[in-house]
């Protein structure tokens, strides 16, 4: 199984809670529309340090083909479009479990 983890930090610190909730809702909806997505967990950070990220995504796929299919899926592309306007930075890692 291939695990894909992404952490996101938002630009607007005044609306972090609302933006985090919106991103979580959009991401959770992907489970119903992306067949290659085997498991997903989305967490909203409770750490208030300025250096901390705001949201974490943990997603599992059978293989790299499944992850690549997810990356180009139209619903995932909508997530990327949302993040273009709201994200300050992100970090990602993919590894075999």
Image: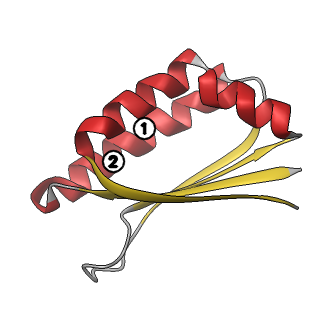
Instruction: Pick the quarter of the image with the C terminus.
Output: bottom right
From the top left corner, tell me how far across and down residue 26 is, in percent: 44, 33
From the top left corner, tell me how far across and down residue 22 is, in percent: 33, 40
C-alpha gap between disc 2 and disc 1 = 6 Å
Check contact, mark 2 vs mark 1: CB within 8 A.
yes
Furthest-left residue in this view: 14
Position of 92 with respect to 35 (left or right) is: left
Would you place residue 43 above or below residue 20 in this image? below
The residue positioned 42% from the left and 38% from the top of the image is: 25
Q: Quadrant of residue 61?
A: top right
The residue positioned 33% from the left and 51% from the top of the image is: 20
The residue positioned 33% from the left and 47% from the top of the image is: 21
Would you place residue 66 above or below residue 15 in this image? above
Quick one: SS at disc 1? helix
Report the residue marked by disc 2.
21
The residue positioned 38% from the left and 42% from the top of the image is: 23
Instruction: In the rendered structure, find residue 90 and report the number of the disc placed on it.
Output: none
Q: Nearer the viewer, residue 2 or 28?
A: 2
Would you place residue 32 above or below residue 10 in this image? above
Instruction: In the rendered structure, find residue 25 and report the number of the disc placed on it.
Output: 1
Position of 1 with respect to 57 (left or right) is: right
Quick one: SS at disc 2? helix
From the top left corner, tell me how far across and down residue 36 is, in percent: 78, 29
From the top left corner, tell me how far across and down residue 31 is, in percent: 64, 31
Position of 28 with respect to 71 (left or right) is: left
Q: Quadrant of residue 53?
A: bottom left
């Amino acid at each position: 199984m291939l695990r894909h983890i992404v952490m996101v930090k938002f630009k607007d610190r005044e609306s972090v809670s609302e933006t985090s909730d919106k991103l979580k809702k959009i991401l959770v909806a992907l489970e119903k529309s992306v067949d290659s997505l085997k498991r997903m967990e989305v967490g909203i950070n409770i750490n208030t340090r300025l250096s901390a990220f705001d949201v974490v995504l943990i997603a599992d796929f059978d293989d790299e083909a499944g992850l690549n299919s997810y990356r180009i899926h139209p619903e995932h592309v909508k997530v990327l479009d949302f993040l273009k306007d709201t994200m300050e930075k992100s970090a990602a890692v993919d590894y075999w479990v």
